Image (cartoon, rainbow, N blue to C red):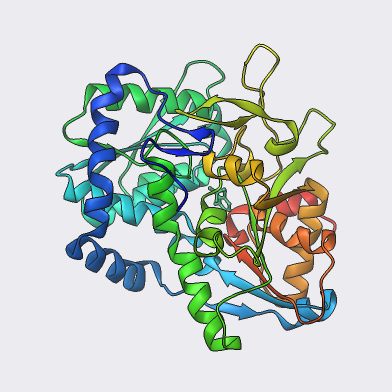
Amino acid sequence: MLVDERGYYGQFGGAFIPEMLFPNVEELRTSYLSVMESESFKKEFDLLLKTFVGRPTPLYFASRLSDKYNAKVYLKREDLCHTGAHKVNNTVGQIILAKHLGKNKIIAETGAGQHGVATATVCALMGMECIVYMGQVDIERQKPNVERMRILGATVVPAMSGSMTLKDATNEAMRHWISNPTDTHYIIGSVVGPHPYPDMVARFQSVISKEIRSQLIEEQGNPYPDYVIACVGGGSNAAGAYYHFVEEEHVNLIAVEAAGKGVDTGESAATTVLGKPGVLHGSKTLLMQTADGQVIEPYSISAGLDYPGIGPMHAHLFDIGRVRFLNATDDEAMNAGIALSRLEGIIPAIESAHAIAALDKLAFDSDDVVVINLSGRGDKDLDTYIRYGNY
Ligand SMILES: *Cc1c(COP(=O)(O)O)cnc(C)c1O
């Protein structure tokens, strides 16, 4: 969808990488489509999505939420995926791809640890060596996920440079990949990074909208909702939820960014409000930056939305007005998370609670069909819910 041969979505995308990384990225660029379209890849991917991840995930009609907002609200239950979120759809796809390319070692970087856990999970599944780079500061903040990765057999390597957070872990992972190009695949966790990663990850996650279409045919006799709502950190769950609807202009696509403490407070992650075009993580996109181009530290109560940019596909969809971007503050998201728990018996990830919070910002007709992508479950966020209180 959308991307051109050089990896551009309109003015965004491309591959801005050090020359020494070129052979690795080029190998991936020239092979990802043919591998993904091969029968043996598709067979293995479909089987593992079914038997390991637990797909198709249900499309759940949320009747009490529907009554509250006077619309037909459905939740796409990515929280029921193995490991508790959508991220595993992508890591399963990439590890099968790695195997097809003859790689037997995997590296990844992680901030909050969710992508690290999803990567360590599929490495255990395939018996591949797994190294996850993680900033030392994040290692201290995210103990349970660090231990999950270690239980799964991964080696967690601390990044000790700079602010000792995600961008430093990314630099270390890139350095490792440059030194080990033949046997190692680098699994990126969202629709970010140099081409072909954004397109590749979007294709792996597109199973979400593929299922929504067939589930809506069963529910209502046609595949089209009036709204699809998803939270956006880097944008992979949103890309998956939008993928098979982007060409259908009558389907309203809504993205919800993290406003943090408020878009004007200096503690926010609302990239489309605060960002400007620039290069982040190997692609041209929208990112939060100072006048002289230094990346501004983002802030959100939810670790998965605490990212200073959005993927190039989303930057383009924002640019052309195809996706409407809203944002929700920490407070709005926390209250939406508690409300969903009480109304439907589902404690959402705080990332996903941002998407729920958008219901208060939209005006629906009573026969509107609204699909919210519930990207993950709230177990990992229990400490944050407890600290926030108010329930
Ligand atoms: C990581 C994560 C996100 C944000 O990542 P995207 O690439 O924007 O989807 C959202 N929800 C959950 C549950 C996550 O773990």
Report the residue at 29% width, 39% height from top: 29
Nearest to the observer: residue 242 or residue 5:
5
Q: Nearer the viewer, residue 3 or 305?
A: 3
Look at 44% across and 45% down and name the residue there: 3
User: How many discs appear?
Assistant: 0
Q: Which residue is drawn at 54% across and 55% down?
A: 237
Q: Would you identify the image quadrant in which residue 204 lies?
A: bottom left
Residue 53: quadrant of the picture: bottom left
Can you give x and y, in whole percent of width and height, for residue 225 in the image?
64, 73
| Rendered location of residue 293, percent (x, y) | 62, 15
Q: Left or right: 287 with respect to 31?
A: right
11 over 294 or under it: above or below: below
Nearer to us in this view, 287 or 141? 287
Q: Can residue 270 be seen in this view?
A: no
Q: In this view, does 346 lie above or below 197?
A: below
Q: Residue 6 appears in which quarter of the rendering? A: top left
In the depicted view, which residue is nearer to us: 192 or 179?
192
Q: Is residue 234 left or right of residue 185?
A: right
In the depicted structure, whether residue 257 falls above or below residue 345 = above
Task: Give the quarter of the figure containing the C terminus.
Answer: bottom right
Q: Would you say residue 312 is visible in this rendering?
A: yes
Measured from the top left, where is residue 165 in percent x and y? 54, 27
What residue occupies the far top of the structure in this picture?
A: 292
Which residue lies at the image location 84% right of the left edge and 76% below the top edge?
68
